[in-house]
Structures are given as C-alpha cells and as structure tokens.
C-alpha cells in the first residue's frame, strides 16, 4: 500500500510540473483520460502523412495532422450537401448530416438517420443515403490509399469520395454534391488570423481537377487543405472561395439553391483577421437520366510537408515529399493524383482483400476485425519521414557506431517509420507492444518493419547517461543503458529518434522481455522475407542483447529469473523468479539464436546457446509445469499458480517462424496443447460466460486473479495472439471463439470501433483507447495461412 501511495505522489508531482508549469502533455496522462465517444468510423489518409477520422454519421471528428498529437473535435462546417433539380427547379436541398447545430442555421440540417447506412472495411467505407420522398439513392464510397507492399501511394495524405447517384424516377434529375470545409481543424489556431483560400485547377495528361486551396498559416507546421472534384464530360465543377462558418451560411446555401451551382469567384480571399474563421466549398454537378445512375468524384488532400516535433529542434520531411516535393504547394497535384488513380488503388485493395473475404471457412466478424483493426497503422499518430539528403552513416549510427552496413541504404530507400503505443500513450514504437503488432507490418509493409528494426538496433548499442527518477520505484538511473533494447524511440512532444525512452514508469534496462522480443522479431522477419543482409546486420546486435540478458540467469540454470517487480510488458503485474511469460520468451529467443547461428555458420555461438537451451528447457519444465499448464511464476506466492493467458507467447512466435517441431521443439507439444485447453476452459469460458475473450490471469478455481490492476483485465492484442497460438496448435474453433469475444465486446457492445483499447474489465472499466497491440490479429491470419 505504501509503495502504491508513494508512486501516486511521485506521479502527481511530475504531472503537475509537466502539464501546469512546463505546459506540455504527459506521455501517459492518468489524470485526464480521453473521454469515450462512440462515434468513430474509418480514418482518411495514407501512412505517415497525418489522418482525419470521419464518424459513422459522416462527421469529420478526429484530427492528427501534427505528428502524434490528437485533437478530438467535430468541425460542423465540414459537410457534404446534396441538391436535386428537376425541370430547372430545385426540388430538394439537404445537408447530409443528422446534426442540428447552432451555427450555419441558414442551412437545411437534420437528415433523418433512419434513411442512412454506414459500412466500413478499412481502408474503405460506404455511406448510403436514401433521400426521403425523392426516389434517389446516394452512395458515398470513401477510399484511402492504404495498399500492402506499396511504398509510394500508401504514403499520400489524401482521401477520395466517390458519389454514386441512382435515379429511380421516370424523369432526369440534375444532382449536385457540395463539399464544404473549414480552414483548420477546429482548434484555437483556426482563429489566429492570416489564413486564406484560393481556387485552383490542375490539368495533366488530359485529366482536369478543380477546387479550392485552404492555406492554414500557423507558425509551426503550416499546411494547406485542398477540396476538389474531377471535371469530365457531363460533370461541372464550381466553387465558393470563402465564407464564414461561424455565421448563418446563407450566402453559400442560396447560391447552391438558385441553380445547383456555386458562383466560382476568381482570385484569393483576404487573409482572416484575428478571431475570424473561414471556410470554402466545392460542388460537382451532373444530370442523371431517368432510371439511370452517374458518378461524381471528389477529394480531400492535405499538405503539411515539413514537420517539427514538440522540441522544434529538427525539421523532418514526410515520406510523400519524395514524390510531390516539400515546397508546401503539392495539394493540387496530390488531389489530381488521387482522383486519377483511385480506381487502380481499389483494384489493388480488392485483389488483397478478396481471397480472405471469399473464404467461406472464415467467420464474418473475423473479416471485419482483420481489416478494420488495420486503421491503427495510419491512425496511430503515425509518422513516416525521409532521411535528410545530407545524412551520412555516422549521423545515424550514433556515438557508439553501430556497424550496420545496410542501415543507410535501407533508411534512405524506405524512410523512417514510427507509430504510437496508443493515442493516449504517447511513445513512439513502444517495443514490448510492437512485438505483438509487428505482424501487421511484416506481412503487409515488410520494409517498414525492417526500417523500424534498424532504428531499434542503432539505439541498442548507444546509451544516454543522463540520470532521472523513475516514477514507479522512485529510484534514479540513466535514461538508456548500452546493449539493451529501448522501451520506445521517444515522445512526439519532444524529439523522437534523438531522445529515446520517453517512458518514465520503470527503468526498462531491467525489464526481461525487451531484448528477447528484438531477437525473436529479427528471426521472424528473416523467416518471412528471406532478407539475409538484414540477418547479417542484426546478428551482432542479437548477440549483444542476449549477453545483457544472460545476467538475469542468476543461478546459471539456463533460465532467466524475474526481479520481483513488474519487469515486462505487464508493467503493473509483479513477477518473481522463473516465469511462464518471460521464461518462455527467453527459451524461444535462445532457440532462434541457435537457428540463426546455424544459418550464418557461427558454430561457436550455436554450441553456446544449444547448451543453454538444453539446461533451460529442463529448468522451465521442472519449475513451472504443474501437469496441466505453466504456473505464472515459481515464487510460491499466493498467485504463482495463476493461469496466465499469455503463458505460451514464446511458442506463438516459434510457431510463426516454423520452429515449433523437430530438432527445434522447445516446449513439449502435449504441454502446450494442455495449457491452451486450460486457458480456454478457465480464462475464456469461465470469464463473462465465454463472451469477452480471455482474462489475463485466472485462479485455478475459476475466479479472476485480482492481485494487480492488470491481472483481471482482458488485453485485446494478447487475446488475438493467444487465438493465433491456438490456431497454430490445431485448436482452430477455440481460437476463433476466443478472439470473437473481443471483437463483439469492442466493436459491437462497447461502440469502440476504430479506437480499440488496450484493455477492458468484465464490468464498466476500459483503459487506453486506440492502442497498438490489437494489430496482432494479423498473426491469426498468418496462422490461418
């Protein structure tokens, strides 16, 4: 109790200084959690250029343009409006929104939600509007360029809206779709003054787009929005350069109402005065013959090419600038590219998704979960930047000189990639969690995983001797020790890559899982990519971190021991002595060291780790196997016999690497299957009636382990990994049932679509919305394949 109270005192002191005196955000804010809003739909944008999330009712409501920094605000002016005209008269004009706001009251709001439907299968979404009494159906298909194995278009900050108009009438209808957008994201700086709009057209290879640019001229990270539509035979594009979204909005509404077109004034708008806000609109119009259909194509692009993180020390160029330039004038070209190429993107998306969607052996909920959980690859505060052109190997290697011969070519070709642990847990590439999520990258964008691993490898051999106090235990230690894997590569509020380990809770140099997770990922990546240059580069780093890890085997029995505190990814769940989780990861890492040594012809290292493996396996079975499952730890405490849902994590990774049988079998097959069946019986079926996934810790008598705040939580990403392990071991039905509980709980019962949390409890408690770990669902797909 005393240590609990002292942690809270230390945390509050630190929090107060950080947020109230320094006026900065906390890396984890335990006092001001993001409130749950059950409104989110599919985000817009590719990887690393920022994201804009639309709600399932069509609103623009979650913004991440500044890297890693979220702003939750529905901007009411950002809307689509439809105008229908018959025989030269406007018969229907309606904002396609159920809202009835206090601004823009000159517009016709309050579309009846009964006539609208939403579907999402990331990276696409569909909104269907049956216009009441009009015999016209609109379907808006939203597309973002998120395409596996594509490292160009997948980086683009764009979204396309394809409006299919079906006219069920016996007469022609003129249809206009107007897209209005505020200059800004609903923050205070929308009113800071100096923002302005201008119309544009962009023509290339016979294809022409037209629209409005909205220049948002802030001191740090200025950007330009572009709203546009594609001009083609039979489609007219008009615009309204600037209007006041805080007023009644009558000038725009009446303009559209008059003839289904906008006035299209030429020239720039005046820059806004301080306190003023501005917006613009673009309109695409066509005639739809009776009993026929037509298509209108609109786009949103945003160009924030050069970004500073919170410290403002370095300027970073986003990945897409490699293809579209960094001058801040790319929005027209981006819009044009999106409107001309979206069909090709959709062909590639369909070719990727179709085999899974058409596989009748796979349940429907799983298909939704598999693709929709991928939202986090772009909407995890994600940043993808280019190396500066003058960057040399020495700049990257750090003072210690990492000796990674392919570091520079890899980062030069594929850039640097980082995503947050969670939208509320602001640390980039949190490595103990990325271990689970990394399956999505290695299977879909393997070069980003390889790039991320090179960044981690560089930090391993370097150190940061700056002392600081850690909040959980109160001890002082240096920021980063040499030859250990960092917890994360930094906070977006500081200077990521340059200053690592933003995590202040524990000194993670003493964590038992980070080094092992690096070694396991290196071999898994090699196994799936056959990239032998990568393996050769990583081999010395693997040896260094395993040497560091060996000191945790205090009794020289070939098995590491935990240190009597929460020294692994379960950072509030104490573990002491040999443990199923870290012990299992250790043996798996020792096994892959043997395998890598064999591949690379390093007989001496192979011999060394073969000896350790043989001793360690015997110790693991002797100290932890109880005849049915592996005990939580060997401490003999009241809860050391708890059934941990993640006890087979080592076997999960070995199975994914094809190392779970024959000469490389580490854990007896019969023991793994028995443990998984026990977890299914107790942690899954005896918890919440088997409908919420697997609880982290369960007592043998079928009561959740309440010894820590994390032992009676369900961790969604851990459950997906557990399900993958079950599928690997032939318990296919059990695996799908286990994972289904999480999907139904998060996406259906709790309304947490596109914000899957790290954790929830059986009743009324959840933690850390929009979290990285659930990307581990892609390990289920690997197991299925």
Image: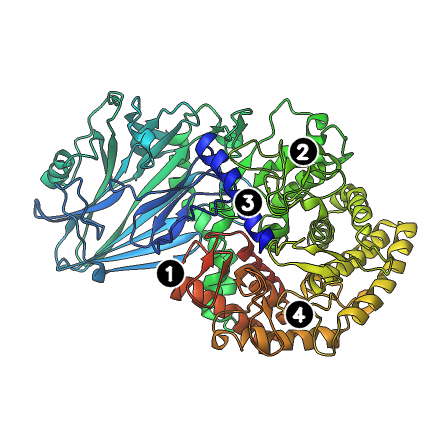
Whether residue 650 is situated above or below residue 78 in the rendered picture: below
Residue 95 in percent (x, y) is at 19, 47
x and y percentages locating residue 110 in the rendered image: 17, 52
Residue shown at 29%/31% (left/top)? 212
Give the residue pinned by disc 4.
638
Horizontal placement of 489 versus 482: left or right? left
Indicate which label's residue lies in the foreground, 3 or 2.
2
Q: Which residue position is annotated with label 3? A: 150
Residue 618: image quadrant is: bottom right
Measured Cα–Cα span from mark 1 to mark 2: 43 Å
First in sequence: mark 1 vs mark 2: 2
Look at the numbered discs 4 and 2 and tell me whether their residues touch, using CB distance below 8 Å: no
Report which residue position mark 2 lands on: 467
Q: Earlier in the sequence, mark 1 or mark 4?
A: 4
Distance CA(mark 4)–CA(mark 2): 36 Å
Q: Circle 4 — which element?
A: loop
Mark yes or no: residue 26 visible. no
Count of number-bearing discs: 4
Q: Quadrant of the N terminus?
A: bottom right
Q: In the structure shown, which secondary structural element does the residue marked by tag 2 occupy? A: strand
User: Between marks 1 and 3, how big is the CA–CA gap?
Assistant: 32 Å
In this rendering, would 735 be left or right of 598? left
| Residue matched to label 1 | 751
4 or 2: tag closer to the N-terminus: 2
In this view of the protein, which residue sits in the foreground, 357 or 383?
Answer: 383
Q: Verify CB contact (< 8 Å) between mark 1 and mark 4.
A: no
Residue 59 vertical position relative to residue 583 in the rendered view, above or below = above
Judging from the image, what secondary structure is the residue with disc 1 in?
loop
Q: Are marks 1 and 2 in contact (CB under 8 Å)?
A: no
Identify which residue is drawn at 44% across, 62% down: 746
**Pair 1/2: label in front:** 2
Marker disc for residue 148 = none
């Amino acid at each position: 109790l005393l240590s609990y109270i002292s942690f809270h005192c230390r945390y509050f002191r630190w929090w107060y200084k950080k947020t109230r005196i320094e006026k900065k955000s906390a890396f984890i804010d335990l006092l001001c959690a993001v409130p749950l809003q059950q409104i989110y739909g599919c985000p817009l944008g590719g990887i690393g250029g920022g994201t804009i999330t639309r709600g399932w009712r069509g609103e623009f409501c979650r913004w991440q343009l500044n890297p890693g920094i979220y702003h939750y605000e529905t901007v009411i002016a950002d809307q689509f409006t439809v105008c229908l005209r018959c025989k030269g008269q406007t018969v229907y004009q309606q904002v396609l929104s159920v809202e009835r706001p206090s601004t823009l009251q000159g517009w016709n709001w309050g579309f009846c939600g009964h006539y609208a439907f939403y579907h999402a299968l990331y990276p696409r979404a569909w909104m269907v509007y049956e216009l009441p009494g009009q015999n016209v159906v609109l379907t808006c298909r939203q597309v973002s360029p998120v395409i596996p194995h594509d490292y160009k278009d997948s980086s683009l900050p764009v979204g396309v809206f394809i409006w299919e108009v079906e006219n069920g009438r016996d007469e022609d209808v003129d249809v206009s779709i107007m897209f209005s957008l505020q200059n800004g994201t609903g923050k205070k700086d929308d009113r800071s003054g100096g923002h302005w709009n201008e119309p544009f057209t962009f023509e290339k290879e016979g294809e022409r787009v037209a629209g409005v640019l909205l220049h948002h001229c802030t001191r740090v990270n200025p950007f330009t929005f572009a709203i546009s539509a594609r001009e083609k035979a039979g489609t007219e594009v008009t615009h309204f350069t600037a209007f006041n979204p805080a007023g009644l909005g009558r000038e725009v509404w009446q303009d559209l109402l008059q003839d289904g077109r906008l006035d299209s004034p030429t020239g720039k708008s005046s820059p806004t005065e301080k306190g003023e806000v501005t917006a613009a609109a673009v309109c695409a119009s066509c005639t739809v013959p009776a009993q026929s259909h037509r298509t209108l194509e609109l786009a949103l692009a945003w160009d924030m090419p050069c970004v500073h993180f919170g410290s403002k020390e370095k300027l970073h160029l986003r990945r897409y600038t490699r293809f579209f330039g960094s001058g801040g004038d790319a929005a027209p070209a981006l819009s044009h590219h999106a409107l001309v190429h979206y069909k090709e993107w959709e062909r590639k998306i369909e070719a990727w998704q179709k085999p899974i969607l058409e596989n009748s052996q796979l349940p429907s909920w799983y298909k939704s979960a598999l693709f929709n959980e991928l939202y986090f690859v772009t909407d995890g505060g994600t940043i993808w930047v280019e190396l500066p052109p003058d960057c040399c190997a020495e700049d990257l290697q750090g003072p210690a000189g990492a000796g990674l011969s392919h570091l520079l070519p890899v980062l030069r070709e594929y850039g640097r990639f980082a995503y947050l642990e969670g939208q509320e847990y602001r640390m980039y590439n949190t490595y103990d969690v990325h271990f689970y999520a990394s399956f999505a990258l290695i299977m879909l964008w393997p070069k980003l995983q390889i790039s991320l691993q090179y960044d981690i490898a560089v930090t391993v051999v370097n150190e940061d001797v700056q002392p600081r106090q850690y909040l959980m235990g109160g001890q002082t230690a240096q920021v980063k020790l040499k030859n250990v894997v960092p917890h994360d590569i930094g906070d977006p509020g500081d200077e990521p890559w340059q200053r690592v380990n933003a995590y202040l809770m524990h000194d993670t140099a003493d964590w038992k899982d980070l080094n092992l997770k690096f070694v396991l990922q290196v071999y898994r990546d090699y196994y799936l990519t056959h990239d032998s240059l990568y393996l050769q580069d990583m081999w010395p780093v693997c040896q260094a971190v395993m040497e560091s890890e060996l000191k945790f085997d205090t009794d020289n029995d070939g098995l590491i021991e935990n240190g009597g505190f929460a020294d692994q990814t379960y950072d509030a769940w104490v573990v002491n002595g040999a443990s199923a989780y870290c012990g299992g990861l250790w043996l798996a890492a020792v096994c892959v060291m043997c395998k890598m040594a064999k591949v690379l012809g390093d007989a001496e290292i192979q011999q060394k780790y073969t000896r350790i493996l043989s001793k360690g396996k015997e110790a693991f079975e002797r100290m932890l196997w109880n005849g049915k499952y592996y005990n939580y730890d060997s401490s003999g405490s009241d809860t050391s016999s708890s059934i941990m849902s993640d006890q087979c994590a080592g076997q999960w990774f070995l199975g994914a690497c094809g190392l779970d049988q024959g000469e490389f079998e580490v854990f007896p097959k019969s023991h793994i299957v028995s443990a998984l069946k026990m977890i299914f019986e107790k942690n899954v079926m005896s918890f919440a009636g088997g409908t919420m996934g697997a609880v982290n810790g369960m007592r043998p008598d079928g009561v959740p382990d309440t010894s820590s705040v994390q032992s009676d939580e369900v961790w969604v990403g851990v459950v997906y990994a557990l399900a993958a392990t079950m599928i690997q071991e032939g318990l296919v039905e059990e695996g799908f049932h286990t994972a289904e509980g999480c999907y139904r709980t998060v996406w259906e019962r709790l309304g947490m679509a596109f914000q899957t949390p790290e954790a929830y409890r059986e009743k009324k408690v959840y933690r850390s919305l929009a979290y990285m770990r659930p990307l581990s669902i892609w390990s289920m797909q690997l197991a299925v394949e």
